[in-house]
Image (cartoon, rainbow, N blue to C red):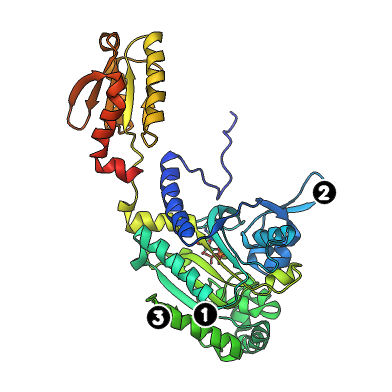
Amino acid sequence: MRKNIQAIRGMNDFLSEDAITFQQVEKAVENVLIRYGYNEIRLPIIEQTKLFQRAIGTTTDTVGKEMYTFIDRSGKNVALRPEGTAGCIRAGIEHGFLHNQEQRLWYMGPMFRYERPQKGRYRQFYQTGVEIFGHCGPDVDAELILLTARCWRDLGICEHMKLELNSIGSLSTRERYSEALKEFLRQYENQLDDDSRRHMYVNPIRILDTKNPNTQNFLKKAPILTDYLDNDSKVHFSELCKLLELVNVPYTINHRLARGLDYYNRTIFEWTSPRLTGSQNTICGGGRYDNLIEHLGGCNPTPAIGFAIGMERLVFLTKKVNPKFFVKNYIDVYLIVDGGNLQQCVALQLAEKLRDTLPLLRLMINHGGGNIKKQFRRANKYGARLVLLLREEEMNFGKIIIKDLSTSTQEILEQKFVAARLQEILNKKEKYIENI
Ligand code: ATP
Ligand code: MG
């Protein structure tokens, strides 16, 4: 027997109900971004492989081990994007929107990493990302953090979120620190796992981001990067901390915070949640990358900062700690048609008229016939508040029945008054307003 074809491991289907919950979280985040004056940008999912190699670094897990790459039909080496920053800068340089300009941009969409699938870690996952170009001050760092904090507030999850901050300084800071860290790690070399041993000589700072508990344990004794910070980075960081105190955003400084991608400098931050388990507890990560644009071929140095939110983890956490945030996608009216072709035509016309007059109305028309009882069952299945029942008896006099399913009361009225009556009834219902 032939086996049915299944989805690829780590790539999820979002069935209706999941898609609706996802959409509501996306909308909440999008609303915040719009309120801060940020603009959406939509970028390709596939880019040239070398873009990510150059931007993220070949020694990172993301590029070194997790990237989906293939040779396309013209022989080009291309990759499914593992993150959005590189593509955004590529577009900025290509279209000249970075040069001497400020940009506040956001995007939402799928990213791809060949990781071991587990709860909160998938091979196709969704990120909302923000990138700000052209500003070097700590006020911008603070705004990004404030913006994310507002998302958590709007989702009703802020008391379950924890902000960790660090500064990783300039390139020379990291070079000096790398040497000290390498020196320290030598005594533990035989205890390092393969990954960390590989990083030790090429990019030891990456080891700080390890998920290996044994390594995490002896790293507690390692020298800290903060002691190697250059003066400008120190000032930048202390100003950011002051600003956050001023606007009442609690934070913890985590000297060992390091991010998985190579391009960061100065401020880096992560929002984690103690309500999520294991190494899948980071919901949002970001930081400055003031040198990346030049590194990717932009002609002038352009300061930049960004973050990305893992949307699956955010949806999961919101469902867990604030399920009340989600509104069921009920419809307002189910239109039941009792009769043949003529009734179907009248129903279709009436439904269109109602949609013209009441743009927020959620109206579903019965398809595929069925007796009235069956049609009422469908109305209940879709959670309809009201039923419009079109029968020959009333239709011949230009009338129709409205039935309120929550009170089981019904009335007969002229079709031309239906829109006004629906509005009257539904406006009284909290749910109708909430749903809008
Ligand atoms: P992690 O440490 O969890 O692997 P990361 O540092 O690799 O995350 P980033 O590249 O900073 O992640 O991406 C930002 C966010 O995207 C993460 O904080 C997380 O919420 C989400 N994310 C990253 N990888 C995955 C994945 N494979 N599946 C689901 N979400 C992910
Ligand atoms: Mg990762």
Q: Residue 247: percent from the left, percent from the top? A: 39, 76
Q: Amino acid at mark 2?
A: Gly
Residue 148 falls left or right of residue 123 = left
Of labels 1 and 2, earlier in sequence is 2
Q: Which mark is residue 166?
A: 1
Where residue 86 appears, x then y in whole percent?
67, 62
Counting the numbered discs, the total is: 3
**Residue that mark 2 sits on:** 75
- Mark 1 is on which residue type? Asn
Residue at the (23%, 39%) spot, across then down = 428
In the image, 389 versus 9, the foreground residue is 389
Labels 3 & 2 near each other (Cβ < 8 A)? no
Residue 172, placed above or below residue 17? below
Mark 1 is surrounded, within 10 Å at the Cα level, by few (under 14), some (14 to 19) or many (20 or more) other residues, namely: many
Q: Nearer the viewer, mark 1 or mark 2?
A: 1
Count neighbours of disc 3 (C-alpha within 10 A) and say few if under 14, some if 14 to 19, many if 20 or more.
Answer: few
Q: Quadrant of the C terminus?
A: top left
Q: SS at mark 1?
A: strand
Q: Is label 2 in a helix, a strand or a loop?
A: loop
Q: Which residue is mark 3?
A: 245
Secondary structure under badge 3? helix
Give whichever of discs 3 and 2 has the lower sequence position: 2
Q: Report, in whole angstroms, how far the alpha carbon at label 3 lies from the one at label 1.
A: 15 Å
The residue at the point 50 percent across, 59 percent down is 310
The quadrant holding residue 103 is bottom right
